[in-house]
């Protein structure tokens, strides 16, 4: 399951960050690594971008980026 | 000339940093002259600490990416015995820099900059409420064997959240000093100085084994989580290993708070970025700001206006008649005063901007409007530079350094000047005060506030369209990714807000005292020369005009026959389709140096050609009463609107052109910007005026 499909308000564990490009690397450097738990806080108008909470801080990302993050409940 | 896309990776523009005596050599060992740099994630509180340590006043605000260049100052470490050169840097999440601002920081931290010695020690500014992510950079710095002292900021917030951090344990686990600082209350500063001095002298760095130990990395796979670090690159493994280490440290040193409870920040955010009301709230906030600017600024503006009028009359009465008095009264006082009277509006605008910036709302506005940005093809981070362009395009253009892709950065630079900057405010205000004052919409909104909002909206709309076209033509590249940290809401700090307001207002006054002053003098000279002799004009008009109109005739004849007048008549055919007469034309041309110059030029022109009966009519009245050569009114509400539209779109600011050239390292882009913006401005003004006339206005 991708982060994009995670219902708002639910918590899940990151399983993988797929793709190997600058942005997935940056996501990992910002703490979104396999094993960490994330929670979807909300989405902006038109359902994009998403706001998530990870390691105690809030991170906004477009759905494109969220698609790369694989999670499991 | 060639349009090249500058590659941000290889090109770092000269920063406008404070010049300090360069200390030669790498890692100077002279005890009295250490070089210390501040390193840390964006928005961790580096500049706040820098300002307290050096007594300087660099910009602080609650969003990531405020500092985009290197800044230096001096820090008295212990009394006057040891002075350090302290460097404030842009924030960075990782030493693997992806954007220009991060590269600038990384290069200084690693001592790769030619004109700056390698720092003897670093202060790693670590946000206590965001420990894990902040420690990532610290770990990287330690891998480079750089002496580091951690300054733990935001401890006040951490305490409120009952987040307990055992600093001794943290220090022990990381093998480096950790100091709690409350910068604004000057707490922990002495201890920080002591620890930094020690670190710089001993150059001690911890000896970590976790990364050099290949086994450790392989061991991470034993976790029950299925690891598909796709491609399993060494880089990803390193990131993973660092975070594993950090998690261990965190678990030992921090007693985490109960994460289930929603923070105050989240509750506020739930309303302000609401799916449906969020955008309405954003527009509401802006309307409220403009409405307040208008209602509060009127009185002080009138007083300033009267003050400058009185000053002019006083100078005129006290000084001997002659060319010098004319220069002082008609040139300097009228020209500079004409701009300075708008200081109240400017101050209020900056006050509100500074408050919004320090609450953390700006980043939320970026979040709300990101869908629009991605449709256009812009980088989500482009939003913050564009927002700061509402104060002035120059810091806005500099702030685009946070955008990774050079093409996206360039597209943002190209549209930044469409954001209505504070220099346009005097022009808008003058037009509205003269032609739309006192009218309301829906009975409670002032027409002025609505018109100003419309002007801002026009600038934004055109910017969006232009970016859309640029991103599909000459700056074609895929829609860039967007990942941005959203800072927590904070109560705006009184000192920060007023400091930001006064720094910006100071720049406005400085411009009035330099650029505007110089142009006022030149313009006055252009209107006052060549001098037609008093004698001859009296003779030539004696028969035609009654005695009491003699002075007026002389004055307006003087203006008409001056260099400015002649020039105005030459360009009149070009601006006539926009409804402007030659006097407005002269002001319009002059305002290409800087937008406020329009106001000062109109003051000078209407003052030089004023009627004798008026002593020192306010500019507003002068504009209302101004006549064309044929005796009809020079201004109608439609002309005023047309002028405002022109000002929204035209590129009339020399300093911005210079900064665009520097940041893109290309004259071609800078000139392209001037050309296309001004072309658009002319077209839009033409459509406004002619369309308005067809509809029966004006
Ligand atoms: N509560 C609290 N707020 C702080 C503290 N230090 C800084 N701030 C606030 O944190 C925000 C960011 O501070 P800055 O000093 O601009 O952060 P920076 O690290 O220079 O940020 P960039 O230049 O964007 O990298 C501002 O709103 C400050 O007022 C602190 O110790 N406690
Ligand atoms: Mg800063």
Image: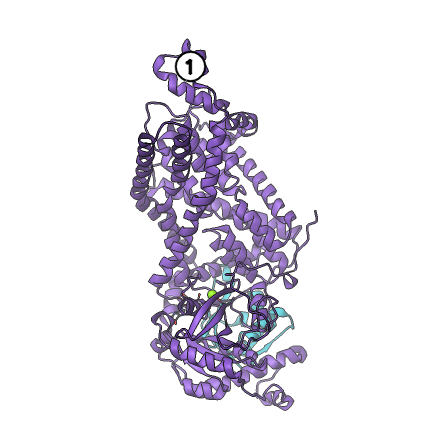
Chain colours: A cyan, B purple
Compared with B105, B471 (above or below) is above
Q: Is residue B516 left or right of residue B100?
A: left
Question: Residue B303: percent from the left, percent from the top?
Answer: 29, 40
Does the residue tagged 1 have its C-beta within 8 Å of any atom of ligand 2?
no
Q: Tell me what residue is drawn at x 42 percent, y 61 percent.
A: B57
Position of residue B86 relative to residue B167, above or below, is above
Occupied quadrant, residue B233: bottom right
Q: Residue furthest right?
A: B2
- Expressed as whole percent of the image width and height from the top left, the position of residue B194 reads 42, 80
Give neighbour class at mark 1: few <14, some 14-19, many 20+ (Cα, 10 Å): some
Q: Residue at x 58, y 51 (%)?
A: B660
Q: Is residue B576 above or below residue B390?
A: above
- At 50% from the left edge and 84% from the top edge, which residue is drawn? B247
Residue A52 appears in the rendering: no
Residue B633 vs residue A31, the one in the foreground: B633
* Image position of B244 (left or right of B153): right
A62 or B295: which is nearer to us? Answer: B295
Disc 1 is placed on an element classified as: helix
Q: Quadrant of residue B430?
A: top left
Quarter assignment of residue B270: bottom left
What residue did someone put label 1 on?
B538
**Drawn side of residue B5 relative to residue B309, left or right:** right
Q: Is residue B176 at least partly visible in the picture?
A: yes
Residue B5 in picture, x, y percent from top left: 66, 55
Quarter of the C terminus of chain B within the rendering: top left
- The chain containing the residue under callout 1 comes to B
Camera-side residue: A42 or B330?
B330
Determine the quadrant in which ligand 1 lies: bottom left
Give the image location of residue B29, x and y in percent: 54, 78
């Amino acid at each position: 399951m991708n982060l994009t499909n995670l219902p708002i308000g639910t918590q899940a564990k990151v399983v993988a960050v797929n793709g190997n490009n600058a942005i997935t690397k940056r996501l990992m450097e910002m703490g979104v690594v396999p094993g960490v738990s994330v929670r979807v806080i909300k989405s902006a108008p038109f359902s994009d971008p998403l706001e998530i909470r990870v390691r105690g801080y809030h991170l906004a990302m477009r759905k494109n980026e969220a698609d790369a993050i694989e999670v499991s409940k | 000339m060639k349009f090249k896309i500058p590659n941000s990776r290889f090109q770092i523009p000269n920063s406008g940093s404070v010049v300090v005596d360069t200390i030669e050599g790498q890692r100077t060992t002279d005890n009295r002259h250490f070089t210390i740099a501040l390193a840390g994630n964006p928005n961790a509180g580096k500049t706040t600490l820098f300002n307290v340590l050096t007594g300087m006043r660099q910009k602080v605000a609650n969003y990531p990416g405020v500092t985009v260049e290197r800044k230096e100052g001096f820090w008295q470490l212990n009394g006057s015995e040891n002075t350090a050169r302290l460097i404030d840097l842009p924030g960075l999440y990782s030493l693997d820099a992806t954007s220009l601002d991060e590269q600038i920081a990384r290069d200084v931290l690693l001592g790769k900059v030619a004109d700056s010695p390698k720092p003897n020690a670093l202060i790693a500014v670590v946000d206590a409420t965001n420990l894990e992510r902040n420690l990532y950079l610290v770990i990287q710095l330690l891998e480079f064997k750089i002496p580091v002292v951690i300054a733990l900021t935001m401890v006040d917030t951490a305490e409120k959240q009952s987040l307990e951090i055992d600093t001794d344990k943290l220090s022990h686990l990381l093998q480096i000093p950790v100091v709690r600082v409350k910068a604004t209350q000057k707490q922990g500063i002495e201890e920080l100085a002591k620890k930094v001095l020690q670190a710089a002298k001993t150059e001690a760095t911890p000896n970590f084994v976790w990364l050099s130990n290949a086994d450790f990395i392989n061991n991470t796979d034993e976790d029950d989580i299925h690891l598909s670090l796709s491609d399993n690159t060494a880089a990803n493994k390193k990131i993973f290993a660092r975070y594993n280490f950090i998690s261990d440290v965190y678990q030992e040193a921090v007693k985490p708070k109960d994460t289930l409870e929603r923070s105050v920040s989240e509750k506020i955010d739930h309303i302000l970025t609401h799916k449906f009301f969020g955008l309405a709230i954003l527009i509401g906030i802006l309307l409220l700001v403009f409405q307040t600017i208008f209602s509060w600024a009127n009185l002080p503006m009138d007083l300033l206006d009267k003050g400058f009028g009185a000053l002019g009359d006083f100078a005129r009465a006290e000084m001997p008649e002659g060319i010098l008095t004319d220069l002082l009264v008609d040139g300097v006082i009228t020209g500079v005063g004409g701009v300075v009277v708008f200081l109240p509006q400017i101050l209020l605008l900056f006050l509100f901007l500074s408050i919004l910036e320090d609450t953390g709302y700006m980043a939320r506005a970026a979040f709300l409007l990101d869908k629009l940005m991605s449709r256009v093809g812009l980088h989500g981070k482009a939003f913050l530079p564009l927002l700061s362009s509402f104060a002035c395009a120059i810091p806005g253009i500099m702030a685009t350094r946070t955008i990774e892709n050079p093409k996206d950065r360039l597209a943002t630079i190209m549209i930044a000047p469409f954001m209505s900057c504070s220099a346009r405010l005097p022009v808008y205000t003058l037009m509205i005060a003269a032609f739309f004052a006192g009218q309301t919409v829906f009975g409670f909104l002032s027409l002025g506030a609505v018109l100003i909002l419309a002007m801002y909206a026009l600038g934004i709309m055109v910017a969006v369209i232009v970016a859309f076209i640029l991103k599909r033509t000459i700056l074609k590249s895929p829609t860039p990714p967007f990942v941005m940290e959203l800072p927590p809401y904070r109560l705006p700090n009184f000192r920060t807000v007023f400091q930001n307001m006064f720094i910006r207002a100071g720049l406005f006054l400085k411009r009035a005292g330099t650029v505007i002053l110089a142009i006022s003098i030149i313009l006055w000279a252009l209107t006052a020369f060549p001098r037609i002799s008093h004698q001859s004009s009296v003779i030539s008009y004696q028969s035609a005009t009654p005695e009491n109109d003699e002075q007026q005739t002389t004055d307006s004849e003087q203006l008409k026959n001056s260099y400015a007048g002649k020039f105005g008549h030459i360009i009149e055919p070009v601006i006539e389709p926009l409804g402007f007469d030659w006097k407005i034309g002269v002001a319009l041309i002059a305002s290409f140096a800087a937008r406020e110059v329009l106001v000062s030029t109109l003051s000078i022109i209407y003052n030089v050609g004023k009627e004798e009966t008026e002593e020192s009519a306010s500019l507003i009245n002068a504009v209302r009463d101004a006549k064309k050569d044929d005796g009809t009114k020079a201004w109608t509400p439609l002309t005023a609107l047309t002028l405002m539209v022109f000002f929204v779109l035209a590129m009339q600011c020399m300093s911005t052109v210079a900064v665009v050239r520097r940041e893109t390292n290309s004259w071609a882009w800078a000139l392209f910007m001037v050309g296309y913006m001004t072309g658009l401005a002319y077209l839009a003004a033409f459509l406004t005026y002619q369309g308005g006339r067809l509809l029966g206005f004006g």
